[in-house]
């Protein structure tokens, strides 16, 4: 059982490193070329990373909560909030749950 946990954590670490690698390369190259000017490959990398971040923000927050209704996502979020968080107050009349960390 221990090897399964170690393998799972190793897999998670590998995924995090794989996702962070382009941003780490962009940051290091930006620091290196800051005084002389950025080459075109770095400009492309930076623009692609900005567009990907903006797309992720739109997809995760703006579109489902403000523009389109997604009842499946709302039900999943509501069930996650009820089962996986700590709250010492009851639910409000609007269905909001005040979490413990908000008061600390």
Image (cartoon, rainbow, N blue to C red):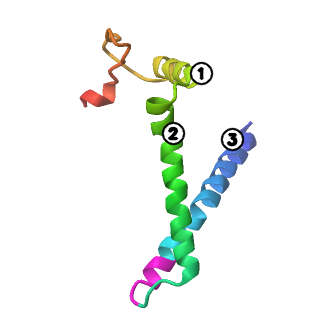
**Residue 25 appears in the rendering:** no
Could you tell me which quadrant the N terminus lies in? top right
Could you tell me which quadrant the C terminus lies in? top left
Span highlighted in magenta in the image: 29-35
Seen at 51% across and 32% down, the residue is 64
Q: In the rendered view, tell whether residue 29 sits above or below residue 95.
A: below
Q: Are marks 2 and 1 in contact (CB under 8 Å)?
A: no
Residue at numbered disc 3: 5
If you read the primary sequence from the N terminus, does the residue marked by circle 2 or circle 1 appear first?
2
- The kind of secondary structure element at disc 2 is helix
Cα distance in 3D space between marks 2 and 3: 29 Å
If you read the primary sequence from the N terminus, does the residue marked by circle 2 or circle 3 appear first?
3
Cα distance in 3D space between marks 3 and 1: 31 Å
Please state the horizontal and vertical placement of residue 37, each as a whole percent of the image. Answer: 44, 87
Residue at numbered disc 2: 60
Residue in front for this viewpoint, 14 or 54: 54
Q: Residue extending furthest front?
A: 67
Left or right: where does residue 72 sit relative to residue 97? Answer: right
Residue in front for this viewpoint, 14 or 94: 94
């Amino acid at each position: 059982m221990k090897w399964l946990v170690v393998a799972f954590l190793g897999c998670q670490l590998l995924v995090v490193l794989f996702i962070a690698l382009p941003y780490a390369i962009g940051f290091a190259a930006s620091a290196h070329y800051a005084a002389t000017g950025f080459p075109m490959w770095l400009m492309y990398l930076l623009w692609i990373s900005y567009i990907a971040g903006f797309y992720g923000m739109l997809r995760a927050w703006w579109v489902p909560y403000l523009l389109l209704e997604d009842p499946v996502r709302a039900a999943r979020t509501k069930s996650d909030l009820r089962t996986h968080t700590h709250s010492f107050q009851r639910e409000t009349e609007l269905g909001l749950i005040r979490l413990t960390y908000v008061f600390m």
